[in-house]
Image: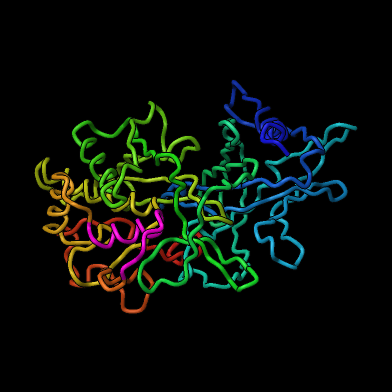
């Protein structure tokens, strides 16, 4: 089916959420039924979800390849992400049909999205293993309310407000688009986490066994990050330097930085936003990728200024250079590297003197650190990996691998999002 036909078929989603009524008296928003063409049944779509937890910050939910099937008086949204799976595909949502004509089905999609999958989109074999378990970890959503809908090119974006059973308020962002993976995207199979670490797809069964692919951007075009418009002027240059550090690691221009238009904030379907975010817990980043190939499609970076350890403006900017380089590294797919042995990667955590040194070297245009250069060129560019010279590696949940081995005081170190263990997600507790 042509791209144009898929885009036309996807228009039913716009109808699903676009027809909303705003009450001038109460400000209430009510989702209306959708008109769906039966022609979309059986076609594949990409469903991606992220959510804001008002008390603990931002997170992503596992991306899925979905299709729609008729089941009596309802439509079923099926998870067809695992093409090799012999079992019937799981039902992600049941969508009631309220009215039917020869050419349309009126359905209520807001009614269908009543649970939230708590498996993260950013994952790794040390999170859930190298064998697909199909945990079905989810929370029920109550008091669901449609907030907004927009059509961004071939992507439908729907925002929904809901609460969990324990009363936690969520804003949930749904991205839905026709699934059209890039034919020229070069997947990278991850064999293990012994020498270097990238976030990975969930395990997929192939004839040779279980396969996991590294999550990474497609670099046929530049990877563009956009600084949010509320980023203070005195810090913008430093953040740009931190982002562009990775061009030195690539050995060529792969990454660009632009100014985000006013009002554009993370998450956003059109931009990889570096969001200046006062308040919260720690600077962090999230990625959303194609669940089959590992291609990163969205990156969300949050820079929280309260993580700065003080100092004058020059010192703060050097801290931000390191912090931006670290978080953009995560956005490119790299895991932490907490191996002892010196400053070999911006993906490590350091005491303040080392942070300032790295920041000043980034400012001066010094070469990228050895681990970063070797690993990003290997995974993204296919360069050989010299294991004799590659610095040591260990990441968050590996045995004996911890950040801040010397236990510095909070005031003596700059930190990002230390926990990448999904058990630390408050929704799981």
State yes or no: residue 240 in magenta.
Answer: no
In this image, 324 relative to 22: left or right?
Answer: left
Q: Nearer the viewer, residue 99 or 358?
A: 358
Residue 125, percent from left and from top: 48, 69
Q: Quadrant of the N terminus?
A: top right
Q: Residue at x 29, y 58 (%)?
A: 372
**Residue 220, picture quadrant:** top left
Q: Is residue 204 left or right of residue 235?
A: right
Q: Is residue 98 left or right of residue 355?
A: right
Q: Residue at x 44, y 47 (%)?
A: 54
Q: Read off the magenta span.
A: 369-386
Residue sitting at the far right: 102
Lateral position of residue 362 relative to residue 189, left or right: left
Residue extending farthest to the left is: 312
Residue 40 point in image, percent of width and height: 76, 40
Position of residue 360 measured from the top left corner of the image (x, y, whole percent):
13, 48
Q: Main secondary structure of the magenta part?
A: helix
48 and 2: which one is in front? 2
| 376 in magenta | yes
Closer to us: 210 or 158 = 210
Relative vertical location of residue 307 with respect to residue 106 in this rendering, above or below: below
Residue furthest top in the image = 24
Q: Residue 403: percent from the left, percent from the top? A: 27, 68
- Quadrant of res 15: top right
The answer to which of 274 and 256 lies nearer the viewer is 256
* Above or below, 426 relative to 222: below
The answer to whether residue 184 is above or below residue 383 is above
Q: Residue at x 56, y 42 (%)?
A: 161
What residue is rendered at 39% in x and 54% in y? 381
Q: In the rendered view, how is the structure colored?
A: rainbow
């Amino acid at each position: 089916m042509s791209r144009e036909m898929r885009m036309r078929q996807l228009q039913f989603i716009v109808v699903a959420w676009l027809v909303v009524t705003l009450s001038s008296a109460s400000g209430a928003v009510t989702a209306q039924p959708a008109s769906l063409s039966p022609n979309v049944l059986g076609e594949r779509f990409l469903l991606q979800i992220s959510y804001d937890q008002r008390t603990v910050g931002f997170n992503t939910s596992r991306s899925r390849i979905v299709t729609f099937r008729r089941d009596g008086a309802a439509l079923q949204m099926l998870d067809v992400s695992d093409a090799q799976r012999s079992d019937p595909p799981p039902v992600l949502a049941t969508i009631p049909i309220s009215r039917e004509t020869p050419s349309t089905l009126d359905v209520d999609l807001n009614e269908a999205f009543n649970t939230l999958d708590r498996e993260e989109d950013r994952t790794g074999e040390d999170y859930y293993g190298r064998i697909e378990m199909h945990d079905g970890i989810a929370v029920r959503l109550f008091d669901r309310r449609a907030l907004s809908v927009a059509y961004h090119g071939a992507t439908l974006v729907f925002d929904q407000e809901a609460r969990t059973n324990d009363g936690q308020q969520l804003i949930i962002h749904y991205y839905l688009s026709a699934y059209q993976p890039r034919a020229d995207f070069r997947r990278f199979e991850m064999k293990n986490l012994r020498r270097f670490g990238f976030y990975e797809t969930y395990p997929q069964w192939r004839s040779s066994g279980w396969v996991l692919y590294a999550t990474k951007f497609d670099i046929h075009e530049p990877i563009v990050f956009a600084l949010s418009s509320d980023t203070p002027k005195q810090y913008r240059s430093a953040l740009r330097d931190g982002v562009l550090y990775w061009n030195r690691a690539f050995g060529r221009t792969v990454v660009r930085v632009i100014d985000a238009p006013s009002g554009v904030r993370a998450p956003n379907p059109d931009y990889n936003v570096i969001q200046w975010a006062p308040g919260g817990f720690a600077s962090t980043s999230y990625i959303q990728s194609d669940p089959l190939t590992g291609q990163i499609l969205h990156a969300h970076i949050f820079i929280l200024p309260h993580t700065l350890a003080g100092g004058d403006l020059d010192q703060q900017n050097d801290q931000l250079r390191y912090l931006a380089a670290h978080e953009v590294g995560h956005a490119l797919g790299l895991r932490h590297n907490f191996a002892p042995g010196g400053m070999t990667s911006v993906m490590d955590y350091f005491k303040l003197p080392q942070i300032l040194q790295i920041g000043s070297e980034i400012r001066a245009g010094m070469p990228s650190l050895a681990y970063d250069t070797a690993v990003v060129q290997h995974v993204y560019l296919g360069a050989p990996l010299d294991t004799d010279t590659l610095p040591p590696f260990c990441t968050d949940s590996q045995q004996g691998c911890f950040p801040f081995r010397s236990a510095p005081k909070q005031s003596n170190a700059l930190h990002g999002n230390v926990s990448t263990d999904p058990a630390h997600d408050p929704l799981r507790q």
